[in-house]
Image (cartoon, coloured by chain):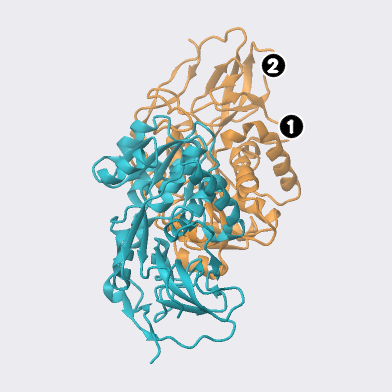
Chain colours: A cyan, B orange
Amino acid sequence: MSEMNRRWVLARRPAGQLKDSDFARADEPLRDLADGEVRVRVTHLSFDPTQRIWISQDSYLPAVAIGAVVRAGAIGQVVASKHPGFKPGQMVQGAFGWQDYVQSQGFTELGPITPLPAGVTPEQALGVMGLTSVTAWFGVHDILKPNAGETALVSGAAGATGSAAGQILKAAGARVIGIAGGPEKTRWVTEVAGFDACIDYKSEDVAQRIAALAPNGLDMIYENVGGPIFDAALAHLALKARVALCGAISGYDTGEVYGLKNYMNLVIQRAKIEGFLVLDYFPRVGEAVAGLGALVAAGKLKGEVDLQEGFDNIPATLRRLFEGRNFGKQLLKIADPPLPAA
Amino acid sequence: MSEMNRRWVLARRPAGQLKDSDFARADEPLRDLADGEVRVRVTHLSFDPTQRIWISQDSYLPAVAIGAVVRAGAIGQVVASKHPGFKPGQMVQGAFGWQDYVQSQGFTELGPITPLPAGVTPEQALGVMGLTSVTAWFGVHDILKPNAGETALVSGAAGATGSAAGQILKAAGARVIGIAGGPEKTRWVTEVAGFDACIDYKSEDVAQRIAALAPNGLDMIYENVGGPIFDAALAHLALKARVALCGAISGYDTGEVYGLKNYMNLVIQRAKIEGFLVLDYFPRVGEAVAGLGALVAAGKLKGEVDLQEGFDNIPATLRRLFEGRNFGKQLLKIADPPLPAA
């Protein structure tokens, strides 16, 4: 009997908060490897707020089909290869999804399977050097375009994207205020990630604290959260402020969308909000990785990893993002490399 | 006894819909003209949505003080002059406000008093060649940057700014859809202003009509109205859409601010919203006036003027804007030039 490939598939389009019943197990036997194919054993999965959009609706990517494996960025190890570009034992990354094995001619639906660079761990590859940091890099340098001495606000500041964005802004000479939930996260944001200040949205009045910390207004906002926190920030724009709209996690999982009331301040302050997606920057990823690598080497970019374990915990781990329970980049390990050939 | 200067002053900060009691008459004797001063008899007043902001709060300009003459753009005639730059009989423009006479050393609080160009009527100067059209010019050319064949949506399309914006977009080669209220206005927008289509928000489902008229989405939005109409438009952004946020008249006078729910679509479509004010373009007004003049001469820019009359009707005429009762640029005539020297 052949080995089984464990798979979490999408059982239905989620409505409101994610539930266990939105997902289902649909394990199937691992088929023989065809000529030209590589077999990857998935070892680490990345969990990102945008996955909630991928399973809900067509957006910038087609929605994950009902019955299909849930789409996710991941790291894996080549365990068998009939493809000239891959050798067993090699560590690779790609959009492998919520399953044990991928068999492919070298591509996933988000692009080519690429080797992990030498000296980079799976945690680093999906974390501080990963797509969330690449997103932050372009959001800061292409959308916000910081000038030294300007004041920036970063929401979701203890999250993977926000913590990278704030550190990239700091390195560019900006004064950076974070927003995060709870004393542990806010302390990490200032003491480890080195933000100038951090507002605890769970215990503080966000609007009052922004006004106190940025009396001349916010020149830049790196927005990950949306909802009332974003609205409070919009009320404190400085003249010619720029807002990089990266996400709005507060609205993804509630079934209720908060309406922004303070958008007229964009006119008063001649300010702009620009949405962006890292997909559009794929041809320039090398530029970001070089910049991020230099910051990591200089000790100016630190990332926290929240590493869960176990295949059965995959759906529950996605929920951690929307419950504000993750601390730093959310990952889950389903296998421990190095693995034997299979 | 010297002649009286009739004046409408701000009695209190308006809350919600404008009321007669927000304004008060405070006539005073006209004082003697000092050396270096010019005396202007105000003939035509301009009414603009932004006046509602000026009397409510400090914004991009300091709020009109309680007891001060209400700020307004206007046309007048020089009726006496001890200023070398002005001669009696000359027609001039400036922010003269809601009063019969201005005595000044050649300035108002918004800048210098300037002569009306030869051959331009007061209606044209405040209307199709006026600041609302200058606003539209820069909103289109500096913010939206139209490409031929793109689709644009213009809200408040029968208003002074919207009708100019749509015609400027048409002249730049865009396909232009307007939104206006009622059959008379929508007919004017297509038949006189030459928009490709116009949605009647009073009798049609705006979201459905946008979807039908722009099946590939909106590349550009010139936004004057805000509220639910803006939200419907945000749901239909095309990839890389640009939104010029000029105003949100629907929220100025209601005391209730509508919250935008569809802003996440800015991320999905990598789109941007940019607020702007014509104030910032004052150094470049000549550029716009040249462009507008060429369009008028070519018959490609037409404006409707809604001309009310009578000093007593000034506060009621401002209300017409927020009740959607004006059709085209709202003006009021308080004196008929040419006037005798005084």
In three-dimensional space, the C-alpha distance between marks 2 and 1, rounded to whole angstroms, equals: 16 Å
User: Given the image, on which type of amino acid does mark 1 rest?
Assistant: Ala
Where's residue B29, x and y in %? 46, 14
A186 versus B151 height, above or below: above
Q: Chain of mark 2?
A: B
| Residue nearest the observer in this picture, A127 or B317 | A127
Instruction: Determine contact: label 2, label 1, CB under 8 Å.
Output: no
Instruction: Determine the residue positioned at 61% across, 7% down.
Output: B35
Residue placed farthest to the bottom in the image?
Answer: A1
A59 versus B96 height, above or below: below
Instruction: Determine the residue positioned at 45% across, 64% down.
Output: B203
Residue hosting label 1 = B118
Q: Secondary structure at mark 2?
A: loop
Badge 2 density bin: few <14, some 14–19, many ≥20, Cα 10 Å:
few
Where's residue A300, x and y in %? 46, 41
Give the position of the C terminus of chain B as an image quadrant.
Answer: top right
| Residue nearest the observer in this picture, B323 or A331 | A331
> Image check: A107 left or right of A153?
right
